[in-house]
Image: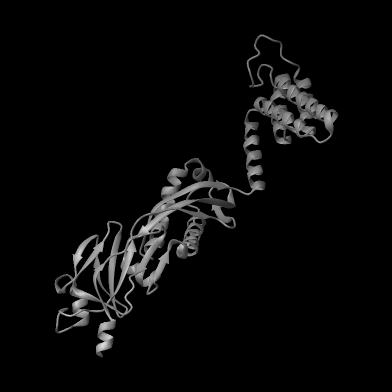
Amino acid sequence: MGLFSFFKKQFLDVLEWTEDSNGVLAFRFPMQDREIQNGAQLTVRDTQVALFVNEGEIADLFEPGRHQLNTGNLPMLTNLKNWDKFFESPFKSDVYFFSTREQLDQRWGTTTPITVRDKEFGPIRLRAHGTYSFRIKNPRVFFKKVSGTRDLVTVEDLQGQLRATVLTSLATFFGSGQVAFLDMAANQTKFSETLKEALDPAFNEYGLALASFYVQSISLPDELQAHLDKVAGMRMVGDLRKYAQFQTADSLTAAATNPGGAAGAGASLGAGLAMGQAMANALSGPGSGFGDNSGTPSEDPLTTISKLHDLMTKGVISQTEFEAKKAELLKKIT
């Protein structure tokens, strides 16, 4: 090395990184035309770690604190360089700082519905979204698999990859059908914890720790949600009196949204009330199993059967329900 090259070099006595912006994960300390002076001071702040890399090979890792760089605290680098002078002269090494602070409010969401084999409803398509946070847990792994020799790595650089990791892991988890949709929606806190456990290994592969994971919304396609609402209503058929009341209430909603104007609305409302009242009357006598009318005379069974047949014809009750009730009433007159 000529005299000019010697004076051109700068010798570093202090190495530190001030995180002047959020979202930076890894920073390569600028080393061009500079060498580290023996005995230099390395400052690593509370939310950082520093990694020394020699010719692409990871050497020494420094935790938060103030470190004096010499042979005693650079054992790996000393071994790699195998210098006879044992750092009595300046030495060259790449130094990378990593931020270990938690990166908050990262968004995730299903761009397209995920098909799930649900325990109760069979194959259904789910949409979900929420937030998560992460931090660097293993800088050595992160350096090898993510940052490499780049000067700067930010959260934005990882967002696409991490979202893909989340959605792939979710699709795999959902595909196993371990948790029913109703259980997911009913207890999102517990479901979030379950998903975090399922996602942890995928983040560890990149040297990251998934600090938190939250499911903020789970939804079904509109047509399936409407079907489930209808099924929930039909379950009230177990009590025909309640089902008649349900049909009356349903008629009120239909009337309010009827495009045929006031006349059409009135007709729909009247029909709904009439069917509900007829069914309630048909099923309110003693022995019918609905209500307590011990103080009033019971209706003639044949009249009741006629009313039930009318309800079946209008689609209010099924033929199976009609036949069962008819058989019960016929027993009273035989």
Q: Position of residue 266 (x, y in %)?
A: 81, 26
Residue at (28%, 65%) from the top-left corner? 16
Q: Position of residue 241 (x, y in %)?
A: 67, 25
- Position of 53 compared to 334: left or right? left
* Residue 147 sits in quarter: bottom left
The residue drawn where x is 54% and y is 51% is 128
Quarter placement of the N terminus: bottom left
Q: Position of residue 102 (x, y in %)?
A: 37, 54
In the rendered view, would you say 158 is above or below 37? above
Determine which quarter of the picture holds residue 30: bottom left
Q: Nearer the viewer, residue 41 or 226?
A: 41
Position of 318 relative to 245 (above/below): below
Image position of 238 with respect to 188: above or below: above
Examine the rendering and report whether any part of residue 73 can be seen: yes
Choose between 179 and 285: the one closer to the eye.
179
Left or right: residue 235 versus residue 88 is right
Residue for point 69% across, 31% down: 324
Residue 86 rendering spot, x and y as whole percentages: 15, 80
Q: For the view shown, which residue lies furthest in the top direction? A: 295
Residue 139 relative to residue 251: left or right: left
